[in-house]
Amino acid sequence: MLPEEVLEQASAEMTDWHGTGMSVMEMSHRGKEFSSIAERAESDLREILSVPDDYRILFLQGGASSQFAMVPMNLLRGRDTADYINTGSWSKKAIAEAGRFCRVNVAATAEASNFTTIPPREQWSLNPEAAYVHYTPNETIGGVEFHGIPDVGAVPLVADMSSTILSRPVDVSRFGVIYAGAQKNIGPAGLTIVIVRSDLMGEVLPGTPTMFNYEVHAKAGSMYNTPPTYSWYIAGLVFAWIKQRGGLEAMAEVNKRKSEKLYAFIDGSDFYSNPVDPACRSWMNVPFVLADPALDGKFLELAKEAGLVNLKGHRSVGGMRASIYNAMPEEGVDALIGFMADFEKRHA
């Protein structure tokens, strides 16, 4: 979901951006018009995330899935092993891809709980010789989320923040690399944000394709090739929208309230349930199941009639999933709760 104000501004500027007679989609990525859009977007993102000066922000393609390979290609730097924390589906994909380039030490896994919790930090078996430690702060499918940054010592920490970035403040200085696909809290699909500490660039695996080298993109200002210009433009509008609404502190306040309200309703019902350890519940993705799975189809059908869409859970886990990213207003959560209460009353 995108903020309505962003969609309205993009609509108004669709055929003529700021009197240029061009749509952003028609601009040269090297022209002064798009350069101003790109520079403003990066400046705003650096401001709202308080990105330190010794970090570079890259606007890339390939989705977060391409980062599963780019991270080891850029960060192994002569070492042959990396630590990974397995908390669900996206962690597993990252682990499988990293295994093509190095020895992967799965330092902790939540498999025993069917990925409904996060292994306590004191139980992690980290390798002090690892090139980096990778984790997924929020697992969209299972609805499990870290509510703090794990301490891994001096080893660079890498995070796939695709589904949690910009939902609250984060101390970027605690990380070596943060990467995120845009299509949750940033903008349309097609753009991937990478925030990388400068000293971690410049020593890639032999044979690394030029397009997979962070330093190449950093030196070219993310324009080594033609970037996803329209997605970059929309992302910039979203960054400005976040600033106008009070920054990440304001985002966090609303997101916390939205999720707590929905979890409280689910926990107070005998008809709905959420399987995740309350200490690890996601602010962004709230999975839930009905007491009678035979009613799933009816629930989705009537929800759609009520204007509530995209509630079907991932095929690997079933049930329902409410994704309540930044742009979902609190009224949307209230509407969902109202529908769920009415459905329960009629079908319990």
Image (spheres, rainbow, N blue to C red):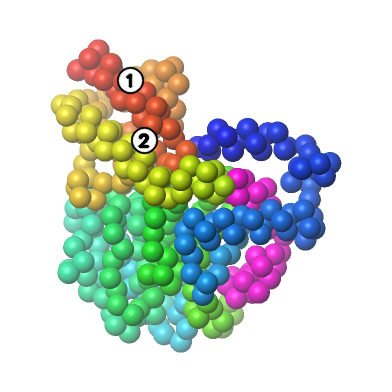
Decide whether residue 228 is among the magenta residues.
Answer: yes
Q: Nearer the viewer, residue 333 or 50?
A: 50
Q: Amino acid at mark 1?
A: Phe
- In the image, is residue 336 above or below residue 241? above
Q: Secondary structure at mark 1?
A: helix
The residue depicted at 65 percent of the width and 65 percent of the height is: 222
Work out whether residue 100 can be spotted: no
- Image quadrant where residue 16 sits: top right
Quadrant, the C terminus: top left
Q: Give the residue at mark 1.
A: 339
Q: Give the residue at mark 2.
A: 322
Q: Secondary structure at mark 2?
A: strand
Label of residue 164 in the image: none
- The residues colored magenta run 210-237
Tell me if 51 is positioned left or right of 285 in this view.
Answer: right
Decide whether residue 39 is among the magenta residues.
Answer: no
The residue depicted at 33 percent of the width and 84 percent of the height is: 129
User: Which one is earlier in the sequence, the residue at label 2 or at label 1?
Assistant: 2
Q: Position of residue 11 (x, y in %)?
A: 68, 34
- In the image, is residue 266 above or below residue 240? above
- In the image, is residue 93 above or below residue 107? above
